[in-house]
Image (cartoon, helix red, strand yellow):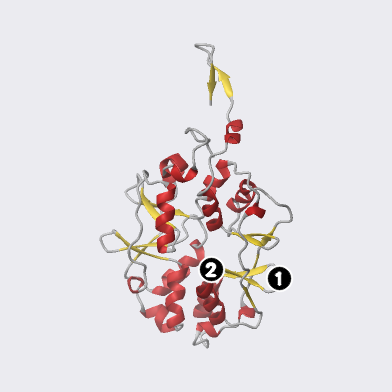
Amino acid sequence: MRPWKYPTKVPISELTLEQLFSESLTDTPCVYLNEQREVCVATEMCIQYLETLVDSLVIRDNNRNPVGMVGGYDLLKHIRENPTRDFQYETKVKEIMLHGLLIVEKSMTFHELMEKWRASRRAFAIIPNSFQGYSPISARKMLEVAVKSKINTPISSLPKKKMITFQPDDTLREIVDLMFEHNTRKILLEYSSQFISDRLVLKEISKALKFQPDVDNFLDIPVNEVELEDVTVVLDDLTINQVSSMMYDMEHPYVIYKDISVTPWDICDVLMSEKISESYQTETKNVVCPHCGKDVLI
């Protein structure tokens, strides 16, 4: 990642998206889906893209205009109401998509973006790129900023949140109900370091849809049939910069330190109260200009 070319000691919240990301702001294209496609297609695609830089699907009309978005929240919200095969095969994504897709400009500040994310409770936006399309901005992408900012605040200073847990004999309905009740995408298996997420729930539903024709109600599936994932447990009180670097390299970022859980959204909250650290200047160096003999910072 390239150093910032902007002054240090500036609150990160006051910097624009262009200042925060520079060339990398639009280097990832959105993943699109036509509004006439079936929900089962969106389910399969979200399994691949949830928790990545893309994170959600951008829904387009027949004129290729973005008209909405679909993520794990939207799919599970409607699956709760109709956990059947007919819903997956017969319902179009335009019937379940979130309208009011947030489209931003590079001049928007991080503070303005976070205000909109908090109001919608959805950490996702798109921005026009040079390829006649759009690029996504997600909480996962903000990890880039945390890595560059060299924030030395320890993760022990993060607010403690109640760890939401589930039991091994729960069903997917109980899991999904917990997710909506506590507004979380990840839930820990009690007395373990394993977790289930919206992506894993959708993955299990997709598997049943394709290979288990005897399953009529997908939310009746017992969670003990689901292949859970392991959360990364850290034993040292790492800095926000260190844990962000770890999460940046994870396929599905999620870290626990003692009784503190850290997700990309938690890092976004930290960035709102931090400044660009002067320590980042140590990653630049001086060279002597061959023409004038003066030091040049690169």
Q: Residue at x 40, y 83 (%)?
A: 86
Nearer the observer, 202 or 143: 143
Q: Amino acid at mark 1?
A: Ser
Q: Which mark is residue 178?
A: none
Label 1 crowd bin: few (<14), some (14–19), many (20+), radius 10 Å: few
Residue 71, above or below 131 = below
Q: Residue at x 43, y 45 (%)?
A: 25
Residue 269 lies, in percent from the top left, at 52, 54
Left or right: residue 81 compared with residue 168: left
Q: Amino acid at mark 2?
A: Thr
In this figure, which residue is indicated by the disc labeled 1? 192
Disc with the residue nearer the chain's start (2 vs 1): 2
Residue 72 lies, in percent from the top left, at 47, 68
Residue 180 lies, in percent from the top left, at 50, 74
Q: Secondary structure at mark 1?
A: loop
Q: Is residue 136 visible?
A: no
Q: Residue furthest left?
A: 63
- Nearer the observer: mark 2 or 1; the answer is 2
Evaluate if marks 2 and 1 touch, with contact meaning CB atoms under 8 Å apart.
no
Residue 226, above or below 185 = below
Number of numbered tags placed on the structure image: 2
Q: Residue at x 36, y 71 (%)?
A: 93
Residue 256, above or below 94 = above
Which of the 4 image quadrants contains residue 37? Answer: bottom left
Residue 2 lies, in percent from the top left, at 52, 36
